[in-house]
Amino acid sequence: VAPQKVNDSLGADILRLWGASTDYSGELAISDEILKRVSESYRRLRNTLRFLLANLSDFNPETDAVAISDMLELDRYALVLAQQLQERVANDHFTRYAFHF
C-alpha cells in the first residue's frame, strides 16, 4: 500500500494512527481492510472527543469542579487507579520505549 495513496484517500491522520497503533517490534501488516478498521476507530475516537469538548465548553474548574473531599468514595478510588496507571505507563513503559504493552 502506497503511503501517498492512503494519504490522498483516507488522510494523513489515518496513516499516523496506523503507525502509532502498530507494534513495530515485529513485522508490520498493512492492507485496505486494516486501514478501513483504523479509519473507523479514528472516526469513533474523533466523534467521542468532539462530544466531550462540546460538553466542556462552558466548564470552569474554579466554580464547577468538585473537591476531592466531596467526591464519592468510588470516584476517589477511580482517580487513584487512573493516577497509578499514568505513573506506571510513564515510568515503566515510556522510559523503555515500550509503547505496545
Image (spheres, rainbow, N blue to C red):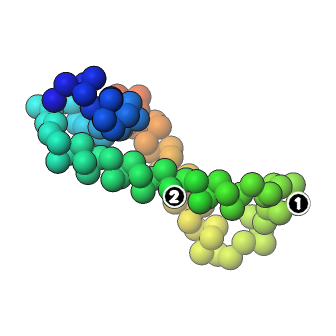
Q: Label 2 belongs to which residue? A: 48
Answer left or right for 73 relative to 48.
right
Question: 10 Å neighbourhood of mark 1: few (<14), some, or many (≥20)?
Answer: few
- Mark sitting on residue 45: none
Farthest residue, direction right: 63
- The residue drawn where x is 41% and y is 52% is 43
Q: Secondary structure at mark 1?
A: helix
Residue 99: in sight, yes or no?
Answer: no
Q: Give the image location of residue 57, x and y in percent.
A: 75, 54
Q: Observer-nearest residue: 87 or 57?
A: 57
Answer left or right for 40 relative to 5.
right
Question: 10 Å neighbourhood of mark 2: few (<14), some, or many (≥20)?
Answer: few
- Quarter-wise, where is residue 2 in the image? top left
Q: Label 1 belongs to which residue? A: 63
From the image, which quarter does the N terminus lie in?
top left
Nearer to us of marks 2 and 1 is 2
First of labels 2, 1 by sequence position = 2
Q: Amino acid at mark 1?
A: Thr
- The residue drawn where x is 87% and y is 55% is 62
